[in-house]
Image (tube, rainbow, N blue to C red):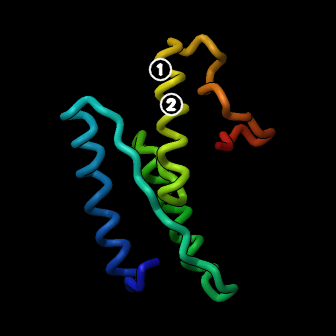
Amino acid sequence: MAGLAGAAQGSYLEELLPALARLKKEVDRDIVVVFENRAVRPDDASVEALARTWRARYQAEGLPVYPNVERAPRGIKHAAAYQRSGGRDGDHPPGLERRADAAIRI
């Protein structure tokens, strides 16, 4: 993950999370986060596990997390369409499919 050591990276993400959550409340606007997956080798499994933990923490604070900059705009587009529709299209934004495990796939 961009060459940062686990402890240094965790410290940065730990400080960033409350700052972004506070900013979201102050500006009353949605904020999205991109955590690019840089774990491509089998021995990077611990990096991916750490990234999943952080993604879950950010999402629990209401901050959507996308795996790359290509998918973030698509997610924003779907969320905006859902908001414009007043949520009339079920309980999740249009264009998204519910999987059996209740996760949303974009």
Residue 33 x %, y %:
41, 52
Determine the residue positioned at 44% across, 57% down: 34
Viewer-side residue, 34 vs 100: 34
Determine the residue positioned at 29% across, 44% down: 21
Q: Residue furthest right?
A: 100
> For residue 40, which quarter of the picture?
bottom right
The circle on residue 83 is 1
Q: Are marks 2 and 1 in contact (CB under 8 Å)?
A: yes
- Going by the numbered disc 2, the residue's amino acid type is Ala
The circle on residue 5 is none
Residue 103 x %, y %:
68, 42
The image quadrant where one finds the C terminus is top right
Determine the residue positioned at 23% across, 42% down: 22
> For residue 2, which quarter of the picture?
bottom left
Residue 85 x %, y %:
53, 14
Determine the residue positioned at 27% across, 38% down: 24
Q: Residue furthest left?
A: 26
Q: Dot 1: within a 10 Å radius of its alpha carbon, few (fewer than 14), some, or many (20 or more) residues? A: few
Answer above or below: position of 25 versus 87: below
Viewer-side residue, 11 vs 85: 85
Please give the residue where the numbered disc 2 appears in the rendered image: 79
- Say what secondary structure mark 2 lies in: helix
